[in-house]
Image (cartoon, rainbow, N blue to C red):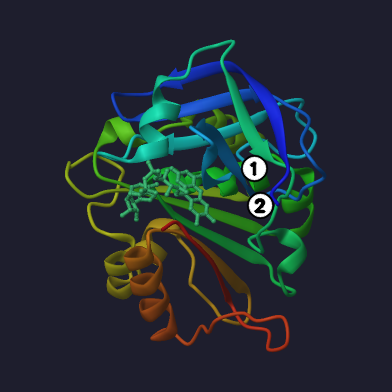
């Protein structure tokens, strides 16, 4: 049976009418940046629970989750309404392979995320390890509109701290915004616009690509990357692409 730990909401930040970040006071099990756990809320006799990535990095004294209110989504609609002081439950288990420990030797780490799938990358970007191991880190965040481009303070802070190492690219599909790509990430890979925006080549000899997003985004991005000679990474068969799918 799944073991649960009670936590108290410290803050529920609403970025817009759908996107939220929940900060929770809870005792987390040991985890690696990039992993996920499950959040549960009691629903009669049972626990209504779903997987959510940890946005905080292991050194931080709270748990943080970044999610959106899915229309008619049973759990996300309830999480959206939580207020400071409310109780929620976190699974005692943390899992997931989208971590630095799972990466083969590489020098350029590309992180491709759409929407709330930015979360695990923020956790990794907050660690010292990623900056010590990588020559370049390229964060690509795909959203529909400018108001979905969240966590800018954190991202810009990292850009200032690691100006030679860190490249950030926003791909905004439904609005034309200066300095941003206006296409889906898979299309930007295929057209070469992503590499042009990064000022770097997706070189299989140097690059590893982590992808996090919806099943369609992950699948389409993998197909586009395979056309460039990159292949899926497996523990027994090292490659260049690691994925996490939000479904
Ligand atoms: C490993 C893993 C990690 C995840 N981490 C996160 C996370 O950090 N943040 C997060 O927002 N979600 C995350 N999800 C999705 C999350 O578990 C829930 O499915 C989502 O919050 C919707 O829950 P719900 O009960 O409201 O609706 P559900 O009944 O679970 O889903 C309703 C519909 O919403 C779709 N959906 C699922 N996630 C999203 C999303 N993020 N945006 C838009 N549509 C979605 C589902 O495909 C489904 O069709 C993760 C999923 C997995 C498998």
Question: Is 158 on the left-hand or right-hand side of 71?
Answer: right
Task: Name the residue at 48% across, 87% down.
Answer: 229
Residue 35's disc is 2
Q: CA distance from mark 2 to mark 1?
A: 9 Å
Give the residue at mark 1. 123
Residue 213 quadrant: bottom left
Q: Specify the farthest residue to the front.
A: 45
Task: Name the residue at 42% across, 76% down.
Answer: 222
Question: Is 31 on the left-hand or right-hand side of 13?
Answer: right
Foreground mark, 2 or 1, reads 2
Q: Residues within 10 Å of mark 2 (few under 14, many from 20)?
A: many
Going from N to C along the chain, the mark reached first, 2 or 1, is 2
Judged from the image, the secondary structure of the residue bearing numbered disc 2 is loop
> Is residue 5 or residue 54 the one in the foreground?
5
Task: Name the residue at 27% across, 34% down.
Answer: 146
User: Mark 2–mark 1 contact, CB under 8 Å?
Assistant: yes
> Is residue 10 or residue 6 the one in the foreground?
6
Question: Is 162 on the left-hand or right-hand side of 194?
Answer: right
Locate residue 155, reporting x and y percent. 53, 35
Locate residue 199, reporting x and y percent. 45, 60
Judged from the image, the secondary structure of the residue bearing numbered disc 1 is helix
Q: Does residue 75 lie above or below 165 as drawn?
A: above
Residue 112 appears in the picture as rendered? yes
Residue 159's disc is none
Residue 155 appears in the picture as rendered? no
């Amino acid at each position: 049976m799944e073991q649960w730990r009670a936590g108290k909401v410290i803050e529920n930040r609403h970025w817009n009418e759908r996107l939220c970040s929940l900060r929770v006071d809870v005792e987390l099990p040991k985890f690696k940046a990039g992993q996920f756990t499950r959040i549960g809320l009691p629903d009669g006799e049972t626990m209504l629970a779903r997987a959510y990535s940890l946005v905080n990095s292991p050194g931080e004294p709270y748990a943080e989750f970044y999610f959106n209110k899915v229309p008619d989504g049973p759990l996300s609609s309830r999480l959206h309404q939580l207020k400071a002081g409310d109780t929620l439950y976190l699974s005692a288990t943390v899992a997931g392979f989208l971590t630095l420990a799972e990466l083969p030797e590489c020098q350029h780490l590309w992180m491709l995320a759409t929407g709330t799938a930015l979360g695990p990358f923020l956790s990794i970007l907050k660690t010292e390890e990623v900056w010590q191991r990588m020559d370049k880190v390229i964060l690509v965040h795909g959203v529909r509109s400018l108001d979905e481009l969240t966590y800018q303070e954190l991202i810009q802070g990292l850009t200032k701290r690691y100006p030679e190492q860190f490249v950030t690219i926003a791909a905004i599909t439904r609005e034309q915004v200066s300095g941003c790509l206006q296409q889906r990430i898979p299309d930007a890979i295929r057209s070469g616009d992503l590499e042009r925006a990064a000022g770097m080549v997706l070189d299989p000899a140097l690059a590893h690509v982590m992808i996090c997003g919806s099943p369609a985004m992950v699948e389409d991005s993998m197909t586009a990357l395979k056309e460039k000679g990159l292949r899926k990474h497996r523990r027994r068969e090292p490659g260049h692409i690691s994925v996490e799918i939000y479904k």
